[in-house]
Image (cartoon, helix red, strand yellow):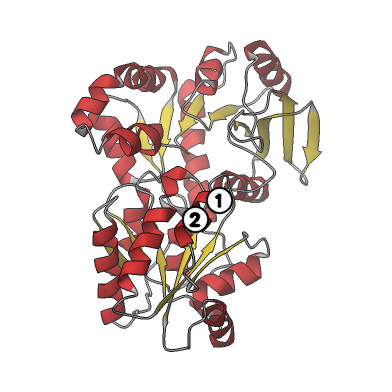
Amino acid sequence: MRIVDVCAFYTPHGGGVKTYVEQKLRLGPELGHEIVILAPGDGYEVIDRGPQARIVTIPSPRFPLDRNYWYFDDEDALHDALDSLAPDFVEASSPWRSPSMVARWKGAAPRSLFMHADPLSAYAYRVLEPIFSRETIDRRFEPFWQHLRRLGTEFDTVVCPSAELRHRLEVGGVGRTSLIPMGVEEGVFSPAHRDPALRRQLLELCDLPDEAGLLIGVGRLSAEKRWPMVIEAVTAASHDTPLGLVLLGGGGQERKILKSIGGNPHIKLLKPERNRARFAAIVASADALVHGCEAETFCLSAAEARASGVPVIVPDRGGAADHAADGAGLTYTATDPEALAKAIGEMAALGWPRTDSPVHTMRGHFTELFAHYQELVAARG
């Protein structure tokens, strides 16, 4: 099949979607499919990524709140690009405006909506839930629920990477949902990459001895990731147990997060590590991964930690919670820094137990995803 991914969230500057796209471009052709990423950009460009794989950008405005991103605003140009690419299957990767544009395209190819984002959790629930109940918020955001329900009728499938997201969409009346979990990059993450010397270096960076616990946090520096809450909880937990925290990430909230760290010498904010081998070694050398975001659709960083034998401490809502199953970590009451601090203390009391549980791989994910797409193509005749 020629699969065209209309990917509104893609940016060459990094992030989870870029990591996902890079693996799709590599694994899709290996599995017998042609992959085209159709993304917004400064201009029209075709970037070849090997046989049967390329990125095509069409002229689009920059996103005003984050200049590293663009957004589709010309529906006719998007339709013309799809006509030119003549896909066998179309995937829309955003629940915002672009899937409605894809739904209105007159082409015959079946199409999917892949839920790479959970706007209700990332924005509405995060901002309003301290004041209103979730049921009240859902009523106030009924127009967005109507939008999602409409997409559930316009697309052949709505792909959900986590069970919690699929359940919530089904309860909200969104039809044609399919659970297809994502996974980790093959051959990169492993408990074998644990490096005592690297762990020692990271603890020294945090002004701590080998005997201290080493926590790691990975992700964009954005409000929904709740890094200030994580910092507050780690600081509180460190009153009972010596703890260092290394955060790896970039984004618009860097100044706010540095302010949250303040003068704490045991918490360090580092730039994202682009070298995959070194990043895998950093993850494997930590004693636990901490995460604050309850709005994850999958939570790649928690999956990578689990694949590295590292226990996770994650919220009890959202895609991150799936990775604490089968003894691979602990969950805490989402958005509650005291609950997170308590969970960190519990993990320390257990001696930072290493995990050895099965994990999904991206090859397995794409094998299942593309088989699902082939079934939908066959159903169209």
Can the viewer see residue 220?
A: no
Q: CA distance from mark 2 to mark 1?
A: 6 Å
Farthest front residue in view: 263
Whether the residues at callouts 2 and 1 have beta carbons within 8 Å, the answer is yes
Locate residue 143 relative to residue 113 in the image: left or right. left
Q: Is residue 264 above or below residue 150?
A: below
Q: Is residue 229 visible?
A: yes
Helix, strand or loop status at disc 1: helix
- Residue 127, given in percent of the width and then of the height, sits at 34, 35
The amino acid on which the numbered mark 2 sits, given as a three-letter code, is: Lys
Residue 50 lies, in percent from the top left, at 78, 47
The kind of residue tagged 1 is: Arg
Which residue sits at x=39%, y=34%?
123
The residue tagged 1 is: 255
Q: Position of residue 341 (x, y in %)?
A: 29, 66
Give the residue number, with chain letter if any, for mark 2.
Answer: 259
Closer to us: 189 or 13: 13
Give the answer, above or below, for where 367 lies relative to 167.
below
**Res 339 label:** none
